[in-house]
C-alpha cells in the first residue's frame, strides 16, 4: 500500500530499498510477524532488476533457471502481499537518527517520518535516478523521444537510436 508522504508512522522495521533484497526482507520479517515500511526513490518496487533489466533474462537466482527482472519483481511482490507492507515510493531517506528510547526515526525528502525499532538498508546498486542534462524544455521530450533507460526493447526496433552516456543500460 503506497503512502502519500508527509505523514508520521510507527512500525517494527524500516527497509530502505525496494529491490529484490528489500522485498525478500519484507517476506522474512512477515514470517516472524513483524511489520515493515519500505522506502524507495523509484516509483515502484523492483530496484535495479525492474529499472534497468525488466526484459533481460537473469540466470543466477536460486531455484530459477531463468527469469526476467520484471518477473522477479512481480513474483516477490506476490510473495509479500500477505504481509501488507507499506511502501513509500518516490521518497528518498534523508535523515536517520537514534531516539532516546533506543528506536530509530527516519525522515524522507517529502517529510514522511517513520519510527521503528530496526532499520534495514537494502540499497543495492544505489539510486537509479537519471543524471539529466541541463537543457530547457527537456521534460517535453521525456518518454517520447528521450529515454533514460531501455525498459521495452520492442519500442526501439527499426528506429534510428542515439545512445549518449554509459553504464549497463546503454550497453544493453
Image (cartoon, rainbow, N blue to C red):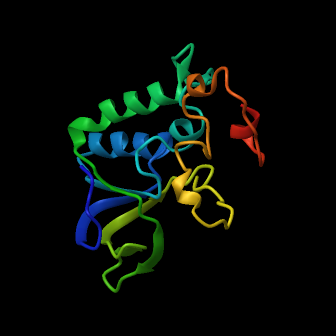
| Residue 162 at x, y percent in the picture | 75, 39
Horizontal side, residue 34 vs residue 38: left or right: left
Horizontal side, residue 68 vs residue 3: left or right: right
Name, please, the residue furthest toward the top. 65
Q: Is residue 39 above or below residue 149?
A: below
Place residue 111 in its image quadrant.
bottom left
Figure quadrant of the C terminus: top right
| Residue 36 at x, y percent in the picture | 30, 54
Horizontal side, residue 120 vs residue 31: left or right: right
Q: Is residue 129 above or below residue 77?
A: below
Residue shown at the point (63%, 50%) measured from the top left: 125
Which of 128 and 94 lies nearest the eye of the viewer? 128
| Residue 44 at x, y percent in the picture | 40, 46
Residue shown at the point (49%, 44%) measured from the top left: 19
Residue shown at the point (48%, 74%) measured from the top left: 94
Which of 79 and 160 lies nearest the eye of the viewer? 160
Residue shown at the point (47%, 29%) measured from the top left: 70
Amino acid at each position: 500500500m503506497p503512502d502519500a508522504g508527509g505523514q508520521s508512522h510507527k512500525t517494527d522495521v524500516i527497509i530502505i530499498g525496494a529491490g529484490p533484497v528489500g522485498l525478500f526482507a519484507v517476506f522474512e520479517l512477515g514470517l516472524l510477524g513483524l511489520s515493515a515500511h519500505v522506502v524507495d526513490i523509484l516509483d515502484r518496487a523492483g530496484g535495479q532488476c525492474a529499472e534497468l533489466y525488466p526484459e533481460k533474462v537473469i540466470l543466477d537466482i536460486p531455484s530459477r533457471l531463468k527469469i526476467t527482472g520484471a518477473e522477479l519483481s512481480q513474483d516477490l511482490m506476490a510473495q509479500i502481499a500477505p504481509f501488507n507492507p507499506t511502501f513509500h515510493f518516490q521518497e528518498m531517506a534523508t535523515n536517520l537518527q537514534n531516539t532516546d528510547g533506543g528506536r530509530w526515526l527516519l525522515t524522507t525528502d517529502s517529510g514522511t517520518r517513520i519510527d521503528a525499532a530496526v532499520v534495514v538498508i537494502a540499497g543495492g546498486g544505489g539510486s537509479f535516478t537519471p543524471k539529466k542534462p541541463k537543457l530547457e524544455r527537456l521534460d517535453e521530450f521525456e518518454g517520447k523521444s528521450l529515454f533514460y533507460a531501455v525498459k521495452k526493447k520492442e519500442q526501439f526496433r527499426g528506429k534510428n537510436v542515439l545512445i549518449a552516456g554509459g553504464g549497463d543500460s546503454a550497453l544493453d
